[in-house]
Image (cartoon, grey):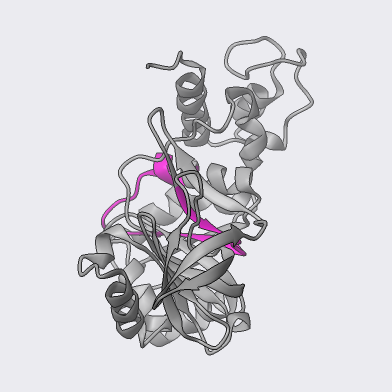
């Protein structure tokens, strides 16, 4: 049996990179088998292509889940980079959801703020200030206006790691990829050719190698999304996945406090003291209500 790394996925078709650098189109065996970019697999040749026989145990899996389906981003990640920009304005709710999903999956996360050369940078900094206070790194850059400085700031955080990059349209994901992977278009071409899918860029999660070997690290680009469901996270577990709220857990009067209305709530007391940002508590409330609502089937 051959070994390989999934570097491209489109439906049930996978592009697998072999240890010697070849790319092989593989297919999943059976409807219950599911592999994603970042998976280590075992495969057997079938003509010029291959069939996936096994998926090695994963260190982690980052995914989102709504009422109707689960969408996996990638597996075996070292980090999640949520890339946002001064312009267009980012959704703090979507940012919080991505960070909660990462915390639930055990994936370290950090935030990149792009386009800080534009007017409005200070307002964006203020919106992200609570994240820095709670211990999440926020790294500023201007990928287009200051490419070399951006490489100096971001490079050490990317090299040697497998990093999934998430971000809304216009945040600069493509620019980031091209800054650190000059041959990105060639890699995309190889994967698209193997998948026979010319519409690759909007539908396929892609692994971009940062060097010649796996130890050099990689960037993983995933298709954009409008919603980020967290149905795999229980309402009672939300506060523990939000560092600013988690810091005050254990101090509530009631062991099963929801932090919404009970007397003696340590989290609401911290909110009143200004130790938790009002925007963060608002997001917690929205998510708690969303996860507490009856499922619609």
Horizontal side of residue 218 vs 269, given as left or right: left
Q: Is residue 197 in view?
A: yes
Residue 87 within the segment the image draws in magenta: yes
Q: Is residue 276 above or below residue 212?
A: above
Which percent across, then down, holds residue 36? 48, 58
Question: Residue 87 appears in which quarter of the rendering?
Answer: bottom left
Residue 79 within the segment the image draws in magenta: yes
Identify which residue, 79 or 152, lies in the foreground.
79
Horizontal side of residue 144 vs 246, given as left or right: left
Q: Residue at x 51, y 35 (%)?
A: 280
Which percent across, then down, holds residue 235? 58, 24
Which percent across, then down, holds residue 164? 49, 63
Identify which residue, 263 or 107, lies in the foreground.
107
Question: Start and end of the magenta stretch?
Answer: 72-96
Identify which residue, 140 or 75, lies in the foreground.
75
Q: Is residue 138 in view?
A: no
Question: Residue 184 appears in which quarter of the rendering?
Answer: bottom left
Q: Residue at x 33, y 57 (%)?
A: 223
């Amino acid at each position: 049996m051959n070994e390989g790394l999934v570097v491209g996925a489109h439906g049930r078709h996978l592009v697998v990179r072999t240890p010697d650098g070849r790319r092989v189109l593989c297919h999943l065996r059976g409807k219950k088998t599911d592999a994603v970019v970042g998976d280590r697999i075992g495969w057997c040749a079938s003509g010029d292509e291959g069939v996936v026989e096994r998926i090695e145990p994963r260190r982690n899996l980052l995914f989102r889940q709504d009422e109707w389906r689960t969408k996996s981003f990638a597996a075996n990640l070292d980090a999640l980079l949520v890339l946002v920009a001064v312009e267009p304005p980012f959704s703090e709710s979507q940012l919080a959801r991505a960070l909660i999903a990462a915390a639930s999956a055990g994936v370290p996360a950090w935030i990149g703020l792009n386009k800080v050369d534009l007017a409005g940078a200070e307002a964006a900094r203020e919106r992200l200030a609570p994240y820095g206070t709670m211990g999440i790194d926020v790294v500023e850059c201007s990928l287009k206006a200051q490419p070399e400085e951006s490489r100096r700031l971001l490079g050490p955080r990317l090299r040697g790691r497998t990093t999934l990059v998430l971000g809304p349209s216009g945040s600069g994901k493509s620019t980031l990829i091209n800054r650190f992977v000059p041959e990105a278009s060639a890699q995309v071409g190889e994967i698209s050719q193997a998948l026979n899918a010319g519409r690759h860029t909007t539908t396929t999660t892609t692994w971009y190698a940062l060097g010649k070997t796996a130890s050099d690290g990689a960037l993983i680009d995933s298709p954009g999304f409008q919603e980020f469901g967290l149905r795999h996270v229980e309402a009672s577990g939300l506060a523990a996945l939000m560092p600013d709220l988690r810091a005050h857990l254990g101090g509530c009067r009631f062991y099963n406090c929801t932090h919404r209305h009970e007397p003696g709530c340590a989290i609401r007391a911290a909110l009143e003291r200004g130790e938790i940002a009002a925007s963060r508590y608002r997001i917690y409330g929205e998510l708690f209500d969303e996860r507490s609502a009856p499922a619609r089937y």
